[in-house]
């Protein structure tokens, strides 16, 4: 996967994670809120991975 693909997946996970987290808070569902937070964290990791790939020229 390239830098752009990783960054697009990261954005999707951050958006979905934020939505889950918000719904979890609104419905008082701590498990859903935690899943959302974990998905946002996954998105952040993918974003970093994409940045590293960009800096190294997709040689990973």
Image (cartoon, rainbow, N blue to C red):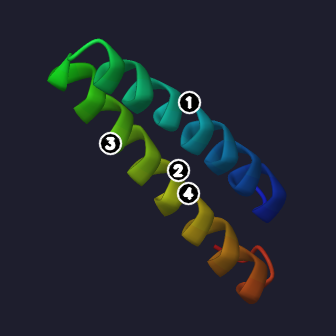
Identify the secondary structure beneath mark 4. helix
User: Please, which residue is most extreme toward the bottom here?
Assistant: 55
Residue sticking out furthest to the top: 27
User: Are discs 2 and 4 less than 8 Å apart at CB?
Assistant: yes
Element at badge 3? helix
Residue ID for mark 2: 43
Q: Are the two marked residues, 1 and 3, in contact with CB atoms closer than 8 angstroms?
A: no
What's the CA distance linking mark 4 and mark 3?
12 Å
Q: Quadrant of the C terminus?
A: bottom right
Q: Position of residue 28 (x, y in %)?
A: 21, 17
Q: Please tell me whether mark 1 sits on a helix, a strand or a loop.
A: helix
Residue 57 coordinates in the image, percent (x, y): 81, 82
Callout 2–callout 3 Cβ contact below 8 Å: no
Dot 2 alpha-carbon crowd within 10 angstroms: few under 14, some 14 to 19, many 20 or more: many
Give the residue drawn at x 28%, y 29%. 33
- Find numbered disc 2 in the image and state the secondary structure of the residue it sits on: helix
Identify the residue at image location x=56%, y=30%.
Answer: 16
Q: Which residue is mark 3?
A: 38
Please tell me whether mark 2 or mark 1 is closer to you in this view: 1
């Amino acid at each position: 996967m390239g830098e752009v693909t990783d960054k697009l997946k990261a954005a999707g996970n951050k958006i979905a994670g934020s939505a889950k987290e918000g719904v979890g808070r609104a419905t008082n569902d701590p498990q859903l809120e935690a899943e959302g937070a974990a998905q946002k964290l996954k998105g952040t990791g993918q974003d970093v991975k994409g940045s590293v790939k960009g800096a190294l020229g997709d040689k990973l």
